[in-house]
Image (cartoon, coloured by chain):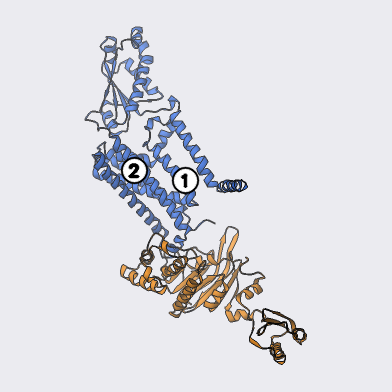
Chain colours: A orange, B blue
C-alpha cells in the first residue's frame, strides 16, 4: 500500500473529531473518503498529510510511519487543499516556483515540472498571467497543478471541486483519471456521490468521525436491498385503460404513470418480465425500460439513517 | 423610510456583532486619549528631567544647594564629577547638568555675581528651560536664608549670581531636527508596514496557504524565519531609501560610525519584522488585527520620543520607555547620524533591538496558529 492510515484518533477538547479511522490507498487506485460536512474528513486528511499529529493511530507512507513536520516521506504526498491556496498577486508560474522550491526542486526541475503540470491541467498558455485574473475553475485546476510539481506518489484531494463549473469539474476528473493511470494513488475526499462513483474503486464512508463502511462500490451496493422499481418509458401520451389491470397484476405493489414514465413497484424484481409481457399483450409500445440501482446516497441513507447533505 | 431604518439597524447590529471592531473603534482611541492626557495634563511633579549636579565650590551653602537639587521632584539631580558630564550630555544619557563654580557662595556674598553653568545636550533645549527655573527656585529657597537677608532680597532685585548656558566640552553635535524626524517617522512607518505584513499573514492563513506550505517537509521555524527575513529586508530597503532621500533633499548625513548605523538599522528591521509576526500571532481576523496593530505602533512610536520630548512623560512612562525597543531604535539612529557618535554607542541600542527581536520571534512562533481558528 502506498498509504495506510491505521486507527487515527483526533480530539479537540471534549470533541472527538476522528475516532479510529483506518483507510488505505494502493498505487494506481483511487480511494474515496465520503461523509457529510463535519464528519471528520478534513481532520483525517490533515493527519494523513502530516499537518496535525494524531492523538492515536499512525499513518504509514510506503510502509514507513510519517512523523513530524520535516519527515522526508512528506515528499511522497501532494495535497490539494479545499481552499484555493494560491498567491493571487503572483503569476501561475511564480506560484508553482514557490511550491516546487519547498520540495527542494532546482530551477530546471521546477521549469520542467511546471510546464508538465500546467499542460496537464490545460493552463500552459496562461502561465504568465496573474492568478487573480483566472476564473474559479481555472484556479481550481491550478490548485491541483501546484500539488503535482514534486511528482508525489500519493495525491490527496480535499473536496477539490467545490464551486466549480461543470466543464472545469470534468477537466479535473479527466486529469485525475490520467494521473491514476500513471500509477498515482489518490485519496479523494468529497460529499458528492457522483464524483466518488465515477473516480473511486474503493470507498470509505465516515460519519461522526467513525468509519461506517469501507468497500468497493459493488460491495457497498450489496449492503443495500436491491431496488424493486421498474421504470418504463412508454410511447403515446394517454391515460391507458390497462393501468388498473396492471395494478392488479400478481407481484405488482403499485403503478404510476406520469409524463409517459411508468413506475412500477414490484414485490420482487423477478416479476419485471411479467410486467413487460403484460404491456406487450396490451399492445402498449415502449421505448426504454430500466430497473434502478442503489447509489451512494441510498447506501449512506441505509447506513446512517440520514442523508449526506444533512449532517 | 422603513427601508432606510431597516438598513441602518442592520449596520448597527453588524457593528455590535463584531466585538473586535467595537474595541478598535471605541476602547483603543480612549486608551490613546488617556495616554495623551497623562502627557499634557500631568502634574508638574510628574515631569522628570535627567540631571546631574557638579559642586566645584564645596561650601556648606553649595552643598545645601546640591541637596535641594537632589530633592527637587523634577530634576532629582545626581551628583557628578565635572569630567564626566560632558560625555553624558553628548551621548544624550543626561538632559542637563548644573555646574556650581568654585567660590560660588563667597563670591555671591561679595557681589561678584558668579556664574552657574547650565549645560544641556543638543536635544534638551526645552528641558534646559525648565531646569533653569528649578535651579533658581532651589537657590532662593535653600541658599538665601543661609547667606543673609540681603541675598534673599536680591534674588528679585539684582541677582548675586548669573546662569549661563553651555554646551558639553569637546563640541556637541548640532541638533538636526530633520534627522531626528526622519528616524522617528521611519520607525513609525516601518512598523505600520510590519502591521500590514501581519494582516497579510492572516489573509494567507484564511486562504489555506499555510496548509499547503506545511505539507512540504519543512519545520515551522523555517516558515517563521522566512517571514522575519523577508520583512526585515523590506524594512532595510525602506530605511536605505529614506536616508538616501533625506541625504539628497535635506542633507542628512551619517556623521557617526557607518557600521554602527548598519547595526542599528538591521537590529530595528529584524525587530519590526518580529513584532509584525507577534501581532499576527495574536490576531484572529485581518480586519481586527489591523486596528490593534496600528494602536501598538502609535503607542510604540510615541514612547520612542519621536513625537514629544521624553521629559513631558509621567515618570512611570519615562521608565517604561526603557523597555520599548522603538525608543532604542530612534536613539541608535540619532546617535549614528546627527550626534556623530562612534561604533561603541551603537552596541547597546543594536543589542537591545536584536534581543527584542529574538524574544518577539520566539513568542510569536510559540503562539502562532497555523490553521484558521474555528
**Sequence order check, earlier mark of 1 and 2:** 2
The front one of A56 and A39 is: A39
Secondary structure found at label 2:
helix
Q: Which residue is mark 2?
A: B186
Res. B231 visible in picture: yes
In the displayed structure, A227 sits above or below A86; it is below
Question: In which chain is the residue bearing label 1?
Answer: B
Q: Which label number is shown at residue B291?
A: 1
Judge left or right: residue B359 versus residue B30.
left
Residue at horizontal 35 percent and vertical 54 percent from the top: B230
State whether discs 1 and 2 lie on one chain.
Answer: yes
Secondary structure found at label 1:
helix
Residue at horizontal 38 percent and vertical 25 percent from the top: B76
Residue at horizontal 37 percent and vertical 57 percent from the top: B226
For the residues labelled 1 and 2, say whether their Cβ atoms are less than 8 Å apart.
no
**How many labels were placed on the picture?**
2
Which image quadrant is residue A111 in?
bottom left
Instruction: Give the Cα separation between the discs numbered 1 and 2.
Output: 20 Å
Q: Where residue A304 sits in the image (x, y, percent)? A: 65, 71
In the displayed structure, B212 sits above or below B323; it is below
Q: Which label number is shown at residue A200?
A: none
For the C terminus of chain B, give its image quadrant: bottom right
Q: Where residue B78 sits in the image (x, y, percent)? A: 35, 26
Question: In which chain is the residue bearing label 2?
Answer: B
Amino acid at each position: 500500500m502506498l498509504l495506510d492510515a491505521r486507527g487515527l484518533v483526533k480530539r479537540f477538547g471534549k470533541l472527538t473529531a476522528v475516532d479510529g479511522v483506518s483507510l488505505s490507498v494502493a498505487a494506481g487506485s483511487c480511494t474515496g473518503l465520503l461523509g457529510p460536512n463535519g464528519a471528520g474528513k478534513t481532520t483525517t486528511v490533515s493527519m494523513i498529510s502530516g499537518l496535525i499529529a494524531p492523538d492515536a493511530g499512525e499513518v504509514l507512507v510506503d510502509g514507513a510511519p510519517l512523523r513530524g513536520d520535516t519527515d522526508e516521506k512528506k515528499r511522497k504526498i501532494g495535497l490539494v487543499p479545499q481552499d484555493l491556496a494560491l498567491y493571487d498577486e503572483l503569476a501561475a508560474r511564480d506560484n508553482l516556483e514557490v511550491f516546487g522550491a519547498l520540495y527542494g526542486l532546482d530551477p530546471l526541475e521546477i521549469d520542467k515540472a511546471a510546464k508538465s503540470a500546467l499542460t496537464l491541467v490545460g493552463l500552459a498558455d496562461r502561465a504568465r498571467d496573474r492568478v487573480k485574473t483566472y476564473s474559479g475553475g481555472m484556479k481550481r485546476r491550478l490548485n491541483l497543478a501546484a500539488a503535482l510539481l514534486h511528482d508525489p506518489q500519493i495525491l490527496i484531494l480535499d473536496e477539490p471541486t467545490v464551486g466549480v463549473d461543470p466543464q472545469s469539474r470534468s477537466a479535473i476528473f479527466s486529469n485525475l483519471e490520467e494521473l491514476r493511470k500513471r500509477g498515482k494513488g489518490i485519496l479523494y475526499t468529497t460529499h458528492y456521490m457522483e464524483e466518488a462513483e465515477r473516480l473511486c474503486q474503493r470507498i470509505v464512508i465516515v460519519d461522526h468521525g467513525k468509519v461506517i463502511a469501507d468497500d468497493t462500490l459493488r460491495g457497498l451496493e450489496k449492503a443495500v436491498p436491491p431496488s424493486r422499481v421498474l421504470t418504463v418509458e412508454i410511447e403515446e401520451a394517454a391515460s391507458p385503460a390497462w393501468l388498473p389491470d396492471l395494478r392488479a397484476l400478481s407481484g405488482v405493489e403499485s403503478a404510476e404513470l406520469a409524463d409517459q414514465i411508468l413506475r412500477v413497484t414490484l414485490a420482487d424484481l423477478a416479476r419485471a418480465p411479467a410486467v413487460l409481457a403484460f404491456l406487450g399483450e396490451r399492445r402498449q409500445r415502449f421505448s426504454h425500460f430500466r430497473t434502478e440501482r442503489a447509489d451512494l446516497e441510498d447506501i449512506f441513507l441505509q447506513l446512517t439513517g440520514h442523508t449526506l447533505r444533512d449532517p | 423610510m422603513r427601508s432606510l431604518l431597516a438598513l441602518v439597524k442592520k449596520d448597527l447590529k453588524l457593528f455590535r456583532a463584531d466585538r473586535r471592531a467595537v474595541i478598535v473603534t471605541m476602547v483603543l482611541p480612549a486608551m490613546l486619549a488617556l495616554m495623551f492626557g497623562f502627557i499634557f495634563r500631568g502634574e508638574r511633579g510628574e515631569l522628570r528631567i535627567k540631571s546631574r549636579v557638579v559642586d566645584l565650590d564645596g561650601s556648606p551653602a553649595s552643598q545645601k544647594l546640591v541637596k535641594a537639587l537632589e530633592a527637587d521632584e523634577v530634576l532629582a539631580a545626581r551628583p557628578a564629577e565635572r569630567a564626566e558630564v560632558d560625555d553624558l550630555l553628548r551621548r544624550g544619557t543626561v538632559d542637563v547638568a548644573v555646574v556650581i563654580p568654585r567660590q560660588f557662595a563667597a563670591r555671591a556674598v561679595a557681589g561678584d555675581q558668579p556664574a552657574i553653568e547650565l549645560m544641556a545636550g543638543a536635544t534638551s533645549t526645552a528641558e534646559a528651560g525648565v531646569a533653569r527655573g528649578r535651579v533658581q527656585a532651589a537657590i532662593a529657597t535653600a541658599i538665601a536664608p543661609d547667606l543673609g537677608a540681603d541675598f534673599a532680597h536680591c534674588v528679585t532685585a539684582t541677582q548675586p549670581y548669573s546662569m549661563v548656558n553651555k554646551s558639553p566640552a569637546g563640541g556637541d553635535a548640532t541638533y538636526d531636527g530633520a534627522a531626528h524626524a526622519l528616524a522617528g517617522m521611519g520607525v513609525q512607518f516601518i512598523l505600520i508596514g510590519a502591521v500590514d505584513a501581519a494582516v497579510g499573514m492572516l489573509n494567507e492563513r484564511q486562504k489555506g496557504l499555510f496548509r499547503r506550505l506545511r505539507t512540504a517537509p519543512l519545520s515551522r521555524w523555517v516558515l517563521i524565519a522566512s517571514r522575519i527575513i523577508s520583512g526585515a529586508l523590506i524594512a532595510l530597503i525602506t530605511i536605505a531609501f529614506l536616508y538616501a532621500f533625506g541625504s539628497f533633499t535635506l542633507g542628512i548625513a551619517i556623521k557617526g560610525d557607518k557600521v554602527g548605523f548598519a547595526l542599528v538599522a538591521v537590529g530595528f528591521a529584524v525587530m519590526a519584522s518580529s513584532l509584525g509576526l507577534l501581532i499576527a500571532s495574536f490576531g484572529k481576523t485581518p480586519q481586527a488585527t489591523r486596528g490593534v496593530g496600528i494602536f501598538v505602533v502609535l503607542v510604540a512610536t510615541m514612547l520612542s520620543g519621536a513625537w514629544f520630548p521624553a521629559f513631558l512623560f509621567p515618570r512611570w512612562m519615562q521608565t517604561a520607555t526603557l523597555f520599548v525597543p522603538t525608543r532604542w531604535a530612534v536613539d541608535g539612529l540619532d546617535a549614528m547620524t546627527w550626534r556623530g557618535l562612534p561604533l561603541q554607542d551603537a552596541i547597546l541600542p543594536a543589542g537591545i533591538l536584536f534581543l527584542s527581536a529574538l524574544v518577539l520571534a520566539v513568542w510569536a512562533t510559540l503562539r502562532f496558529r497555523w490553521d484558521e481558528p474555528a
